[in-house]
Amino acid sequence: MSVLTPPRSTAPRRSIEQVLADARARIERLDPAAAALAQREGAVLVDIRPDENRLAEGEIPGAVVLHRNVLEWRFDPASGARVPEASYDLQVVVVCNEGYTSSLAAAALVELGVWRAADLVGGFRAWKAAGLPVLPRS
């Protein structure tokens, strides 16, 4: 019977709060009004919330819906699985429920070279609380 030992790593351990702070330092964060304006000016809002959340709470009109686990493949302009809109210069505003996962996702896009990737402060719930348009999921 083998005994499991922790892997040896030279990487320092960091808390999720530290990882989140580092991610947010690399991205632009837009409040709901700024995100709505960006969308009107051509930015793509990308809703990465799970199906259950969109079903229960609704969707942002015009937002692209993608599961979080495929975001980088869909918005990496060098990927064979990219969406037609994918571009290094495209402003992409990532939306999650409350603005945490979207920060990490937007930072991942910045690492791919999508330098204008941003996230929505407060997520979908802040968008809705601001009185911005929400459609029931169809």
Image: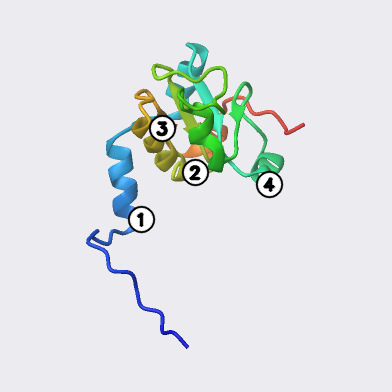
Identify the secondary structure beneath mark 2.
loop
| Mark 4 → mark 3, Cα distance in angstroms | 24 Å
Callouts 2 and 3 close, C-beta under 8 Å: no
Question: Could you say which quadrant of the image residue 118 lies in?
Answer: top left
Residue drawn at 48 percent across, 18 percent down: 43
Q: Which mark is residue 52?
A: 4
Q: Which mark is residue 16?
A: 1
For label 3, the residue is: 109
Q: Where residue 8 sits in the image (x, y, percent)?
A: 28, 68
| Mark found first going from the N terminus, 4 or 1 | 1
For badge 2, the amino acid type reads Glu
User: Which callout, 3 or 1, points to the residue nearer the camera?
Assistant: 3
Residue drawn at 77 percent across, 31 percent down: 138
Residue situated in front as seen by the camera: 75 or 55: 75
| Mark 4 → mark 1, Cα distance in angstroms | 24 Å
Identify the secondary structure beneath mark 1.
helix
For label 2, the residue is: 98
| Mark found first going from the N terminus, 3 or 1 | 1
| Mark 2 → mark 3, Cα distance in angstroms | 19 Å
